[in-house]
Image (cartoon, rainbow, N blue to C red):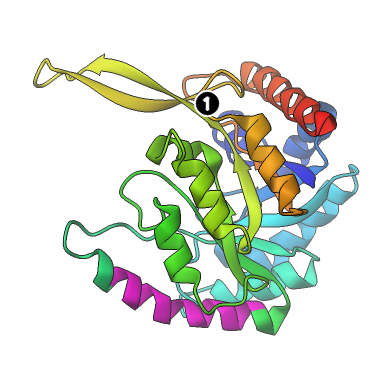
Amino acid sequence: MKLLMFSKMLKDVGKLSVDEAGDRIAEMGFDGVDLTVRPGGHVLPEEVIGKLPEAVDTLESKGLTVPMITTGITDAGEKYAEDIFRTASQCGVKFLKLGYWRYEGFGKLKEQIESLRSRLKGIQDLSKRYGVTAAIHIHSGNYLSANPDVVWMLLQDYDPDYLGAYIDPGHMTVEGGLSGWRMGMDLLSQHIRMVAVKDFGWFQERDEKTGKKRWRPDLVPLGDGLVPWPQVFTHLREIKFNGPVSVHSEYKNIGLEELIQQTKKDLDYLKNIIRAL
């Protein structure tokens, strides 16, 4: 497994360039980078042909690998989709995270699943053409990929080496905190090609409009939240997972140096779990 840092927060919080982000990621001890190649990312989709090779070269010069990128692609026919797949392949990037499809509301789910299943063929075709793996990220909330069971249905009859699952035990625990995350991993075990790492806790707050209390999930340091990470990595070992692991560090209201300090702690926590397996 390659332990990567998701580059999003270094750009959003620290406004760091690829070069600057690479220095900090290498200093923290990561194996590589999960680079954002999407609107607002380190590489913009319209600039991917020229900028992605430059970014990969810069990061590799610092001893980092770039085995995966995060994109916003949701359809093979959208503008720049093929440019991104082709350029990623040329740069040696094997894995591409796809974008998101919103859940359209009660009564629409079956229709949405059927519609998206047919459209995913175009994405798998791109993956086959360029020898890469695209993956659907599990994300809690009003997303079609919030439920691992739905992701499993979407992936039926597709080759997981070209169209797989990008599991996120943090989001899976938000939606299925007792055993839902484990059953999701079990169901998707043959499809898992990428893993995202973040931890969540539930917090109570008062609604400013109604005055009523409500619960909301929020990020917490690894090991302080609901995700039983030792068990997650035990199951990953059981299925012989050997793909990229992306540490997200999407902490709110935090400065760059504090973000880096917390990310380093999270990385050390992960390394200790993996060593103990």
Q: Main secondary structure of the magenta part?
A: helix
Residue 21: x, y in percent? 73, 36
Q: In the rendered image, is residue 39 in sight? A: yes
Q: Is residue 171 magenta?
A: no
Q: Considering depth in this image, is 203 or 31 the residue closer to the camera? A: 203
Residue 226: x, y in percent? 50, 26
Q: Which residue is mark 1?
A: 251
* Amino acid type, callout 1: Tyr
**23 shown above or below 251:** below
Q: Is residue 115 magenta?
A: yes
Tag 1, which secondary structure?
Answer: loop
Q: In the rendered image, is residue 6 in sight? A: no
Q: Considering depth in this image, is 142 or 8 the residue closer to the camera? A: 142
Q: Quadrant of residue 264?
A: top right
As drawn, is 208 to the left or to the right of 120? left
**197 shown above or below 244:** above
Residue 56: x, y in percent? 79, 55
- Residue drawn 87% across and 50% down? 60
Residue 90: x, y in percent? 78, 72
As drawn, is 162 to the left or to the right of 19? left
- Residue drawn 69% across and 47% down? 236
- Residue drawn 47% across and 80% down? 77
Q: Which residues are magenta?
A: 112-127
Q: Quadrant of residue 257?
A: top right
Q: Quadrant of residue 259?
A: top right
- Residue drawn 55% across and 73% down? 81
Q: Quadrant of the C terminus?
A: top right
